[in-house]
Amino acid sequence: MLPLCLLTFAAAVQAHNQLLPGSCSFESSTCEYTSDSDFASWTLHKDGHFVAVDSVDEQDAERGAGEKPGLTGVLLSPALEQSEWSCLRLVYQITGSGSLEVLQRSEGRSFDRPLWSSRAPSDSWVISSMDLQNNTEPYRVVIEGKPGGSPGSSVAIFEIHISPGFCLECDFEESHLCGYSNQWNANVNWYVGGGEVQLLHNGLLDDHTFQNRTGHLMYVDSIYAKTFKEVAKLVSPMTTVPMSGCLSFQYQRSVERGNLFSVYTRDRLGQYQELWRPELEQQSEWSGTLGEWIPVQVDLKAPYSVQVVFEVTFNSPRGGRVAVDDISFSSEFCSSDTEPTFDPSVASCDFESGFCSYTQDQVTGSSWRRVSVKPNIFRNGDHTTGAGSFLLANSRLSPRSGYVSRLEGPTLPGNMKYCLSFYFSLRGFNQTDQALAVYLQSGSSQEKIWSQGEKSRGIWIAADSTFHTSQPSKVVFISTCRSFWDCGSVALDDISVKLGDCELPATAAADSLSSPLPGHCDFEAGLCGYTQDKQSDAADWELRRGPTPTSYTGPRGDHTAGLGYYLYLEASTMLSGQSVRLLSRPLRGSRGSQCLSFYYHMYGSGTGRLGVHLDNGGDDVLLWQQSGEQSIAWLRARVEYQSDSLHQLVFEATQRFFSEGATSPLMTLPWKVDPAQKWRFKPPWEPPTRSSREPLGRMHEPWIHILFLHIRQLTWCSPGKHVNQNL
């Protein structure tokens, strides 16, 4: 079974590090943690003091059972009520292959909130930390272990510790070191000092926590440095929720021939940003030996996941020593003069109610116009709802040429990283790189941060750009028209600005094994747990990208990115009145209202009916329905519902009921029913026929039509906002 290696928690917990309910060492019991009966069971191994879920049992392994389908074990904590911020530290091991995910389940909510996840196997116990924000409602910690299918794979948990405070905080008195780790270097590394152990070559006497030799601290010494610029890094656990406030720590430093001590933040892409370094006047006070502890307070703004890195660089074996102790964090900034974390939503706009905070430069001689159009094959509806407003620059029919359209955003604070995303659509003879470009303007200078490189094909295309501001700046959208042949229409919609890198999720929890947003699915990575009802298999829901295979039906691209995937149904094989159902996974009930939001596309002269139903254990309730051709654009629907018991949401597509008046000159594969009621192919060039006894007013045949229904971007939104919209 799993080896018990290296990391163990101290048996006696200090009073200042008191553990909270939900903590468990699994020495003799599971501490009221229980296995969900609908999944595989977690097994308590009393000899090793851990719980585990295995892919195969020992008897199967002895018989050579080989590969087996992966299991899922769900471990539920007792109900927890913790109104203050706390930190959950998990000691775990993934052997062979598998995954482990931690979620938070609040009472009365249908979805669990992802906190952390991992797929990385290891040959020893590993520590992970995750912040639990203050919560006024009871909740449970949900741990999902999924061992791989090969024999010997398992997922195990050794200890769960929940302590008050932030995961960044540490006094280094516990053997787990609060999840802090040393980034290994062949010559210089951070070590644990103190504990009445004589430390060679350093002269460290008392730690800061207890002001005596029994306490512990972290230190690094240059005595083993062999090359120029030897670097030692002490790295905090990754933050899992947005946080801002005051980071405090104590340090000692000696300088003989030189060292550099700095503190950085490092994001999940490995990009550094300096947070603090000693002032010059402080350096002049350092002596050749370690002495008094020096306090440091520095403001930390982490709207996305970061690690705090304490870095010391030596340039010789006589570069001195550095010690760190008592790292703490407060949600209040160190200085009352510190500006609060910037809210980037002021630079976001969907143009449904105006230009938001965006302005136009009238000096350039042209302007962006806010328009709302009825979509057809020659022009798009807006991207937000399919029937709303967007911005339009230039026009292929305009007699003017040789002008520039500038749209300027609000001022963004400096020394921050931003992610800009938006949607654009181009139509015209020549789509040059000047048709649409985005600049970052700082004072009188501007820098291009994005230009159009993808042919739009008349559909909405998603674009994004990551940029860093060294000083206050503005984002500027510029469309340049040099001549009639270059001036097509340029459409812009749904501008969004967020803090952080576009390649990264907002938090470590968002980079989870499940969907980053509970209940969300954009079909880019599969069906997200949605399944087709096998009781009705007249046709199949399928993933597709690009235009549909039949002319004059369906979209030309998906709604999320324009070049991504969507789910569609072709009903050419379906008989009149037949239905195909798409089922969500079972959802827990909720005390309050839920809001289902999705985008759908119903275009084509033979389009049938799309409905959304609530299935409460066989009790079917119709929530929303649309019939017939709706629009050539993606349309948004929002539906409010309430269910306090286990339920499923059902998307049902129904083939239209045919009548004698049903004809479709646009279909490329029409079919005809002969008097003997036998199906045969009717070529499109064959003229319609009629009986000599039939009146002129009934000269038409019943046809079967290809049906396309597309469901896109299913999300659960905030109740009470634009719900029950049948667009």
Image: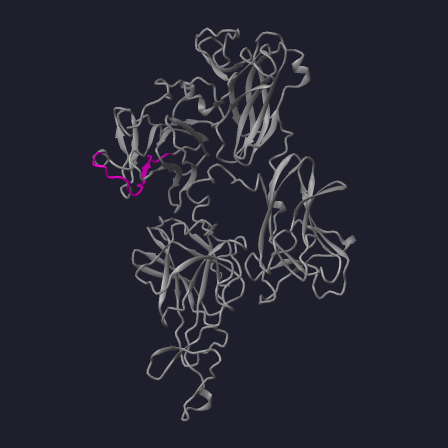
Q: Quadrant of the N terminus?
A: top left
* Displayed quadrant of residue 66: top left
Would you say the magenta stretch is mainly helix, strand or loop?
A: loop
Q: What residue is rendered at 52% in x and 15% in y?
A: 219
Q: What residue is rendered at 33% in x and 80% in y?
A: 677
* Displayed quadrant of residue 255: top right
Q: Nearer the viewer, residue 119 or 681?
A: 681
- Percent coordinates x, y for residue 632 in the rendering: 53, 65
Question: Is 601 positioned to the left or the right of 370 in the image?
Answer: left
Image position of 14 with respect to 619: above or below? above
Q: Is residue 460 visible?
A: yes
Does 309 lie within the magenta span? Answer: no
Identify the residue at the far bottom of this view: 693
Which stretch did the figure color magenta? 62-80
Image position of 28 with respect to 614: above or below? above
- The way the protein has been coloured in the rendering is one colour
- Percent coordinates x, y for residue 549 in the rendering: 48, 64
Does 79 lie within the magenta span? Answer: yes
- Percent coordinates x, y for residue 12 in the rendering: 35, 17
Question: Is 671 positioned to the left or the right of 222 in the image?
Answer: left
* Displayed quadrant of residue 498: top right
Q: Nearer the viewer, residue 727 or 441?
A: 441
- The total of numbered circles placed on residues is 0
Image position of 565 with respect to 514: above or below? below
Q: Is residue 244 visible?
A: no
- Percent coordinates x, y for residue 550 in the rendering: 48, 67
Q: What residue is rendered at 49% in x and 77% in y?
A: 665
Q: Nearer the viewer, residue 97 or 298?
A: 97
